[in-house]
Image (tube, rainbow, N blue to C red):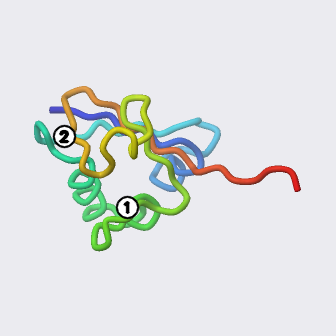
Amino acid sequence: MRVELEFFPWLGEQLGGQDYRSRHLTWQVDASEGEAVGALFARLAAGDEAFRRLIFEPDTRQLGSQVVVVLNDRLLDLAGGLDARLRDGDQVAIVPALAGGAR
């Protein structure tokens, strides 16, 4: 089955996109039916050092502190977290976490 991962700037640039102005980078990845998001991320991290450094550390099962993950338009935490099961055609968006505000 296929799952789509979208990485928004600056993450897309760090993972091989043309540059941050391209708005995002999209990967089509193969996954097993019912595979957990955490298992997919662990496989991707094993083959891509930038993914491991920025997105997911498989040894500790921790998402990067600077990212927010959205599964089919729902925050990953509200969709079952890293144990959420994937289905064919699912979309996973990985966006930079935002912080800041007025003093």
Q: Amino acid at mark 2?
A: Asp
Q: Give the distance between the C-alpha atoms of the residues marked 1 and 2, in whole angstroms.
A: 18 Å
- The answer to whether residue 20 is above or below residue 66 is above
Residue 103, above or below 46: above
Residue at 55 percent of width and 58 percent of height: 66
Is 48 on the left-hand or right-hand side of 24? left
Q: Residue 57 occupies which quadrant of the picture?
A: bottom left
Q: Quick one: label 1 or label 2, which is nearer the N terminus?
A: 2
Q: Residue 85, how many percent across, how many down?
A: 20, 40
Q: Which element is circle 2 on?
A: strand
Closer to us: mark 1 or mark 2? 1
Q: Going 25% across and 60% down the picture, which residue do you hit? A: 42
Residue beneath label 2, please? Answer: 30
Q: Residue 89 placed where, x, y %?
A: 25, 26
How packed mark 1 is, by other alpha carbons closer than 10 Å (few <14, some 14-19, many 20 or more), is many
In the image, is 93 to the left or to the right of 38? right
Instruction: Give the residue number, with chain letter if any, for mark 1.
Output: 56
Residue furthest to the bottom in view is: 59
**Relative to the observer, which residue lies in front, 48 or 32?**
32
Q: Quadrant of residue 39?
A: bottom left
Q: Nearer the viewer, residue 86 or 29?
A: 86
Query: Where is residue 22 shown, x and y percent of the image?
Result: 58, 36
* 90 left or right, relative to 30: right
Q: The residue tagged with tag 1: helix, strand or loop?
A: strand
Residue extending farthest to the top is: 89
- Across and down, in percent, residue 13 comes to 54, 50
Quadrant in the picture for the N terminus: top left
Q: Is residue 23 above or below residue 63?
A: above
Q: Is residue 102 above or below residue 49?
A: above
Residue beneath the point at 37% across and 61% down: 56
Q: Amino acid at mark 1?
A: Phe
